[in-house]
Image: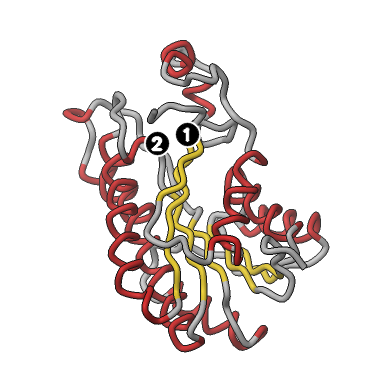
Amino acid sequence: MTAFDLTGKLAWVTGAGKGLGRAIAEALAEAGASLAITSRTGEDLDRLAADLGTAHVLPGSVSEPGFADDCVADIVRHFGRLDILVTAAGISPSFRRSEDSTDEDWAQVVDVNLTGTYYSARAAGRRMLEQGSGSIITVSSVHARTGFDRIAAYAASKGGVEALSRVLAVEWAPRGVRVNVLAPGYFHTDLSAGLVAGKWSERLLANIPQNRVAAPPELGAAAVYLASDAAGYTTGSTLTVDGGWTA
């Protein structure tokens, strides 16, 4: 067994139906973890479960009060423990200029990306604190620390995720629970398709020293590291996977 081996661990991945969430779920499974997977779209979860061979499917929205608590209760009933949480559930902005965006635009993005992350981390953290161990990985974005046009709600929500994660890391470190942030740059996913393939692509690439948009599996190994014993002394950190953008 290596320090990166997740055999015997139970991982819950939100937003696992597609994109980066799916890629992270696949990487954790390849490293040996058993999986519970959440997405708003049950069909996406069923496809992932079929591709993986097995996974515990928990469809629903992390932004709904009580949903995360119900998920953790269900996971514990089935598996007896919860070792890893990855909060990959997220939605894209309306891509309107800030002065033209609506209250509904703001609320929808913040409810899923920030409030949903808090609900999920709080529910998982309660169980992990009882166990005295666990790894929580919140998913932020390069835009938690870099500006761009028409993404005010998205950037604010991801900045909030990073601040929240630092607080949880400090609170829970003495009781055995690690909390870290995974901050991806631009990857080829449905969420970013309108940017990376459209008129904004040239501007995006100009900000990326590696001069390319990444493939989702390139994020998986970073999640495995943060989830594993190899990161045993890593908490309150942000691991940025962005081709050099923030540098």
**What element does badge 1 sit on?**
loop
Q: In this view, does 239 lie above or below 58?
A: above
What residue is at 35 percent from the left and 34 percent from the top?
94
Residue at the far left in the pictured view: 99
User: Alpha-carbon neighbours of circle 1 within 10 Å: few (<14), some, or many (≥20)?
Assistant: many
Q: Is residue 82 above or below residue 116?
A: below
The mark that comes first in sequence, 1 or 2, is 2
Q: What is the three-letter code of the residue carrying label 2?
A: Val
Q: Mark 1 points at which residue?
A: 185
- Between 149 and 182, the one nearer to me in the picture: 182
What residue is at 28 percent from the left and 65 percent from the top?
167
- The image position of residue 120, as x and y in percent, is 43, 68
Asked where in the image residue 228 lies, by quadrant, the reply is: bottom right
Q: What is the three-letter code of the residue carrying label 1?
A: Gly
User: Alpha-carbon neighbours of circle 2 within 10 Å: few (<14), some, or many (≥20)?
Assistant: many
- Judge from the rendering whether residue 146 lies leftward or rightward of residue 52; answer left or right: left
- Judge from the rendering whether residue 72 lies leftward or rightward of residue 247; answer left or right: right
Cβ atoms under marks 1 and 2 closer than 8 Å:
yes
What residue is at 39 percent from the left and 28 percent from the top?
247
The image's colouring method is: secondary structure
Q: Mark 2 points at which residue?
A: 142
Residue at the far right in the pictured view: 53
- The image position of residue 42, as x and y in percent, is 63, 59
